[in-house]
Image (tube, rainbow, N blue to C red):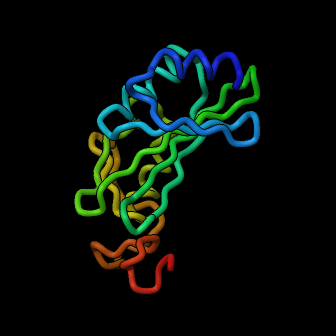
Amino acid sequence: MTAAIEKIRDAFPDRLRNWEERGGRRFCAEVAPAHLVPMARALCETWLLRFITISGTDTRASLELLYHFSCDPEGAVLSLRVAIPKEAPGIGSLSPYLKAAEWVERELREMLGIDFAGHPDPRRLLLADDWPEGVHPLRHDAGGGAE
């Protein structure tokens, strides 16, 4: 584990759970949805990690988001894993704090149906204006989506 990632892990023992190391310089930890925005802000503002992107998937049991951050000086990547219920797919937006999150949150809203509370511009980004409301192409229940 790199020095910076180890310090982050030790600083938040109650918020970052189930640590995994993947290949020496990739690390992943679970975070509760309520802690995501403050954790992401701390990683960028206090620990000076760089926000990379967010990836999302429908695991059938929940919607899983991975927030990826780079510790450039050490060449390490830390991903925060958040599981949100499919019945109430919402989480706080990083966009008010990290402009780089704006488009990817819009994409995940369309593709997976996730509501990013506080997002400054929830307009469609990819899907046509006449795309049916409530149909999200990357959800298993989308009828021809990610099976």
x, y percent for residue 126: 48, 65
Q: Quadrant of the N terminus?
A: top right
Quick one: which residue is furthest to the left in this view? 88
138 relative to 94, above or below: below
The image shows residue 69, relative to residue 65, as above or below, that is above
**103 or 54, which lies in front?**
54
Q: Position of residue 10 (x, y in %)?
A: 52, 17
Q: Would you place residue 91 above or below residue 10 in this image?
A: below
When asked about the image quadrant of residue 119, the answer is top left
Q: Is residue 131 left or right of residue 45?
A: left
Residue 93 position in % (x across, y down) = 35, 40
In this image, 86 relative to 73: left or right? left
Residue 68: which quarter of the image? top right
Q: Residue at x 48, y 44 (%)?
A: 81
In the current view of this chain or complex, which residue is farthest to the bottom? 144
**58, 48: nearer the viewer:** 58
Q: Is residue 102 left or right of residue 129?
A: right
Q: Residue at x 38, y 71 (%)?
A: 136
Q: Is residue 5 above or below residue 62?
A: above
Q: Residue at x 46, y 50 (%)?
A: 65
Total numbered circles: 0
Residue 3 place in picture, x, y as percent:
69, 16
What residue do we see at 76% from left, 35% from top?
24
